Image: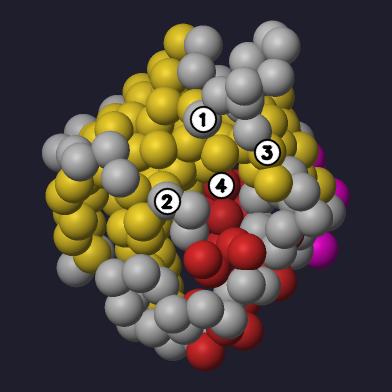
Amino acid sequence: MADWSIQGEYMETCNCDFLCPCITSNLTAVPTEGDCKAAIAMKITKGEKDGVSLDGLSFIVLLHAPGVMMDGDIKVGLIVDEAASDAQTAAISDIATGAAGGPMEALGPLVAEVAGVEKRPITFVSNGGTISVTAGDLIDQEIEAVASALPGGEPIKIDNVPHPVTTTLALARATKSKFNAFGIAWDDATGSKNGHFAPFAWSA
């Protein structure tokens, strides 16, 4: 297993009402819609695998759990920035599926299907407490941070959580959550659904 490392920014939206009960129940609660659909977007600011630079590339893991996440039977699909070369796409695929070890490997026992890889132009824009991500015609999502009433107005965070990206997540509401890929479809702009964001650092 080759050593690798990536770091950067992460954001996601899901179809659960705010605040997603999956996170606060150690993945044992029934999702608020009965199933879980989530798009986990990652922007790599610095990274490499097997000597292949991954700087500046983004990818999105789209997942669907038909019920309680800990019960498994999860379908995942991967969207990779179309700017990635074949070598970069292979490296990101190994990292994002857990084949190369690292945080996503722990999700492996819960995954029943890896639905494939799509390539699209990915934009990942962070502007203060607003973060938006698009991936061609497949993903269009945006979140607004939930600011604390404490001086400074930093986002409220939840710590020591069982999440593959990181153990500390900032809370957000999804102002837009639209995806349609790998047979996983969702479209909501009510502002009532869940979002998260955080810096991340992965390695193996």
Which of the 4 image quadrants contains residue 106?
Answer: bottom right
Vertical comparison of 136 with 60: above or below: above
Tag 1: amino acid: Val
On the image, numbered disc 3 is attached to which residue?
157
Around disc 4, counting alpha carbons within 10 Å, would you say few (fewer than 14), some (14 to 19), or many (20 or more)?
many
On the image, numbered disc 2 is attached to which residue?
18
Main secondary structure of the magenta stretch: loop
Q: Residue at x 36, y 56 (%)?
A: 17
The kind of secondary structure element at disc 2 is loop
Q: Are marks 3 and 2 in contact (CB under 8 Å)?
A: no
Q: Is residue 179 magenta?
A: no
Tag 3: amino acid: Lys
Q: Nearer the viewer, mark 4 or mark 3?
A: 3
Which of the labelled discs sits on residue 92, or is there none? 4
Residue 42, visible in the rendered structure: no
Q: Residue at x 76, y 38 (%)?
A: 201
Instruction: Name the N-terminal-most of marks 3 and 2.
Output: 2
3D distance between C-alphas at marks 3 and 2: 13 Å
Instruction: Name the N-terminal-most of marks 4 and 3.
Output: 4
Which of the labelled discs sits on residue 161, or is there none? none
Tell me where the magenta segment starts and ends, as one range: 1-5
Left/right of residue 26 with respect to residue 39 in the rendered view: right
Q: Nearer the viewer, mark 4 or mark 1?
A: 1
The kind of secondary structure element at disc 1 is loop
3D distance between C-alphas at marks 1 and 3: 9 Å
Q: Quadrant of the N terminus?
A: bottom right
